Image (cartoon, rainbow, N blue to C red):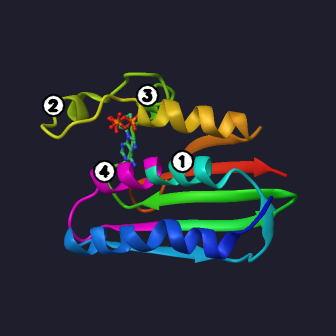
Amino acid sequence: EPVNVSEFMKQVIDPYKEIAETQNKTLYATEDATKQVVFDPKRIHQLLVILIDNALKFTQEGDEIEVFSTIKNQQWILEVRDSGRGIPDKEKKHVFDRFYREDSARQRETGGYGLGLAIAMWIVKNHNGKITIRDNQPKGTVFHVEIPF
Ligand code: ATP
């Protein structure tokens, strides 16, 4: 059944704004489409939570996280952009593998099994969509998601 994208985004993102603030980071949403789209809100919520959790994990004080949403060419485009440490090119193709964690992440004390992005990929594929990684400018990572409808 159709869901209002703006309302959905607000519900997902609002709690994370406070979490980011306590870490002295800025998290905000940008959007240029307020449409009704048919999607599985539970799954897309889970997808965004995975990407936002990672963005919070791999950024430091003063960094920014932007969650962007738009509708273009019959597709819902979602991006989680962070100004964190980034993902080296040679790691990019591996991060969606189950149990993969980049070396420095493996050494982190704080949990994580390297499952998040494998689940994210699964959710996107179930919506016949695509998820790709880009470098953010001047630094950090962009997770780009396209979901057709
Ligand atoms: P889990 O999600 O199971 O708690 P995790 O975050 O380590 O653990 P994934 O979400 O699958 O696992 O991410 C895999 C790896 O990709 C991470 O360990 C990290 O090296 C890298 N990664 C993911 N997101 C980012 C990001 N926003 N910035 C930098 N590196 C990232």
| Kind of residue indicated by mark 1 | Leu
> Which region of the structure is painted magenta?
50-66
Q: Which residue is mark 3?
A: 90
**Residue 15 horizontal side relative to residue 120, left or right:** left
Where, quadrant-wise, is the N terminus in this rendering? bottom right
**Mark 3 to mark 1: distance in Å?**
24 Å
| Kind of residue indicated by mark 4 | Arg
**Mark 3 to mark 2: distance in Å?**
19 Å
| Kind of residue indicated by mark 2 | Gln
User: Given contact means CB atoms under 8 Å apart, are the residues at marks 3 and 2 in contact?
Assistant: no
Of the two numbered discs 4 and 1 in the rendering, the one whose residue sits closer to the viewer:
1
N-term-proximal mark, 4 vs 1: 1
| Kind of residue indicated by mark 3 | Lys
**Mark 4 to mark 3: distance in Å?**
14 Å
Ligand 1, seen in the image, is in the quarter at: top left
Q: Which residue is mark 4?
A: 85
User: Given contact means CB atoms under 8 Å apart, are the residues at marks 2 and 1 in contact?
Assistant: no
- 20 vs 39, nearest the viewer: 39
Expressed as whole percent of the image width and height from the top left, the position of residue 71 reads 77, 65
Q: Which residue is mark 1?
A: 47
Q: Residue furthest left?
A: 109
Expressed as whole percent of the image width and height from the top left, the position of residue 93 reads 51, 27
